[in-house]
Image (tube, rainbow, N blue to C red):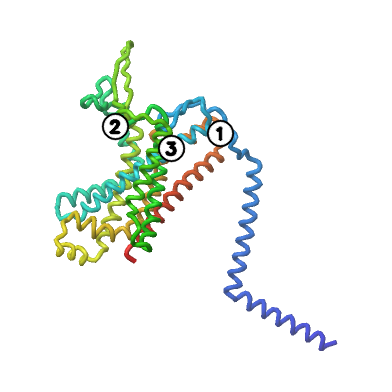
Amino acid sequence: MFSYLFQQLKSEESNNKKLEILFYDKTFRKFIVQLIFSFVMVIFLLYLIARAFSLDLGFGHLGSRAGFGLSHTFLTDYSSNDSRWQAYFVGIINTIRVSFIGILLATTLGVFMGLARLSNNFLISKISAGYVEFIRNTPLLIQIIFWQLVLLQLPQISEALTFGGFSVWSNRGILLPFINSIENGSIWFLILLVSLILTLFLRSYLNKYREENVNFFSPNIISLLFFITIALISYFLLGISLYTDIPTLEVNEYGTYIQSGGFLLSPEFSAILFALVLYTGTFITEIVRGSIQSLPKGQTEAAQALGFSSYQRITLIILPQALRSIIPPLTNQYLNLTKNSSLSVAIAYPDVFMVSRTIMNNAGHALPMLSLILVTFLGLSLFISIFMNFLNRRVTRIGT
């Protein structure tokens, strides 16, 4: 009897020692903490799901009539009688438009000012440095509102500036000459844009194939022929008829000034575009400057010894090598520009966020609309990331 009790006490003591050893075991403690955290997160997730089922999270209200107009309908024929889905699609087009043009202009400005910062000319270098320090350290939202106020200071429509009858400048916007089409012009433009992207991918594939087959035809010529073929076939199939659209300013019988024709740069679009380009251009400037300065000085000295001009040194020696360190941070700036375009709601430019806010004010359903905005910007960001990662792999593969 006593021996049995002694064995039980001994086994309990050994179990306590095992538990004590487990308690002081670092891996075991981490496992317990993770288990508790996972349990709490599951409970919180179940709570959110239960709350979500009590809300109306559908998108059926987007099929109803919009009931509001939009000041910018690029590539689309939208009216207030169209559905809210169509209004949201117009917002997506406007966001892509300002982001795409902004990326192109900001890249051009950033490369130019980055090279200017490294110039031996004192005035050019200091102007570039002043641009970076002033624009980068002021809020983007303030810059957007500033540019809108500046553009609204243009003359009234009755005193509009006309330059040789080819352009009209007023506080309603800037009208510029434009190549337009009687019908299907928007569809043809989209086809050209898609074919251009396919041409770039085709050129990359052909360059890779040519490395294995030396006698292969020039990838540049084949890619160019591919693009021209698609452009011509779509041109004749869609029955495109191009004409020169010249801006006009007329006065009707009631004394009202009416401007028509041409390509309109409204104060809202111009303000958000100028602000995004100037602001993002400062960061691209520093990226270009730092990437060039990271290169060994022997590269520049070797190019000078070979008699290369400044333009040849930059385009053939410096920038191709600097691209390896430029593209990764440049991708972040492209993503920032796209997401910062949502600040255009402050000046009533009808982008995705502005259109969604109008829909929420008219029909409610804030949570589904905000979720739709998140998905839209996520899709745009992922597309930019995929393209830039493809470009980065292409650049880093050369010369390896």
At a point 22% along the width and 53% down the height, the residue shown is 115
Disc ID at residue 188: none
At a point 25% along the width and 23% down the height, the residue shown is 160
Amino acid tagged 1: Leu
The mark that comes first in sequence, 1 or 3, is 1
Amino acid tagged 3: Ile
Task: State the residue in front, 295 or 188.
Answer: 188
Evaluate if marks 1 and 3 touch, with contact meaning CB atoms under 8 Å apart.
no
- Give the residue at mark 1: 62
Residue 328 visible to an observer of this rendering: no
- Give the residue at mark 2: 151
Closer to the eye: label 2 or 1: 1
Quarter of the image for the N terminus: give it: bottom right
Whole-angstrom CA distance, mark 3 to mark 2, is: 23 Å
Callout 3 environment at 10 Å: few (<14), some (14 to 19), or many (20+)? many
Residue 91 visible to an observer of this rendering: yes
Callout 1 environment at 10 Å: few (<14), some (14 to 19), or many (20+)? some
Question: Residue 180's x, y, as percent?
Answer: 35, 30
- Give the residue at mark 3: 93
- State the SS at label 1: helix
Quarter of the image for the C terminus: give it: bottom left
Amino acid tagged 2: Leu
| 6 is higher (above) or lower (below) than 26 | below
